[in-house]
Amino acid sequence: MKTILIMRHGEAAPMQADDAARNLTQIGHDEAEKMGIWLNKNFHPDALLVSPYIRAQQTANGVAKNNAFTFSETTPDVIPEGKPQVAADYLETLIATHPECNTWLVVSHMPIVSYLVDQLSPGNMPIFNTGAVAVINYDEQTQRSSYLSINAPANV
């Protein structure tokens, strides 16, 4: 059994012409670090898949202050307008090819984070606050997932 953690980036600056270049606010940096401590305490993620957008990269960096990743990759498959089926298939391929990694963290954006949860565990499409993390158990033998919870910085 593997654990998949799907995280929305921390609070970001207001929308601008170049969406990919938006930075985290100070609150967003604080959310990332707080969730990084919580993730380390509860899950010890050892693999990271992250969007190339600046705010997702900054969130992953904040989480990484408290976690050590054996595997880390940036992929455009998890950008806001990414296709959930493609992202889920790619994640499942990575899980199969990196058996040494037991807990996978995906740092991404709305709306794909909600759609990705539903893709992995149909019938579950949570709305993510900034910095929130959905927890999913994944059985790599059956390729079936179970959505467990969503956890926001204000509640951990």
Image (cartoon, rainbow, N blue to C red):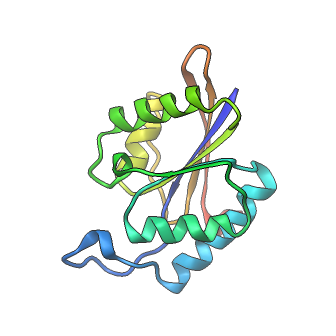
Percent position of residue 145, x then y: 57, 26
Residue 152, percent across and down?
60, 61
Residue found at the far right of this picture = 41
Q: Name the residue rendered at 34%, 54% in the picture.
A: 79
Q: Which quarter shows the C terminus?
A: bottom right
> Which residue is at 39% across, 61% downward?
52
| Residue that sits furthest to the top in the current view | 142
Picture quadrant where residue 154 is located: bottom right
Looking at the image, residue 21 sits to the left or right of residue 113; the answer is: left
Q: Of residues 114 and 56, which is closer to you in this image? A: 56
Residue at 52% of width from left, 34% of height from top? Answer: 94
Residue reaching furthest to the left: 17
Q: In this view of the protein, which residue sits in the foreground, 64 or 128?
A: 64
How many callouts does the rendering have?
Answer: 0
- Vertical placement of residue 72 versus 63, above or below: above
Relative to 45, does residue 40 appear above or below in the rendering? below
In this rendering, the answer to whether 111 lies above or below 17 is: above
Quadrant in which the N terminus appears: top right
Q: State the image coordinates of residue 95 (x, y, percent, origin top left).
A: 57, 31
Q: Position of residue 53 (x, y in %)?
A: 37, 65
Q: Nearer the viewer, residue 123 or 100?
A: 100
Q: Is residue 120 above or below residue 130?
A: above
At a point 53% along the width and 54% down the height, the residue shown is 7
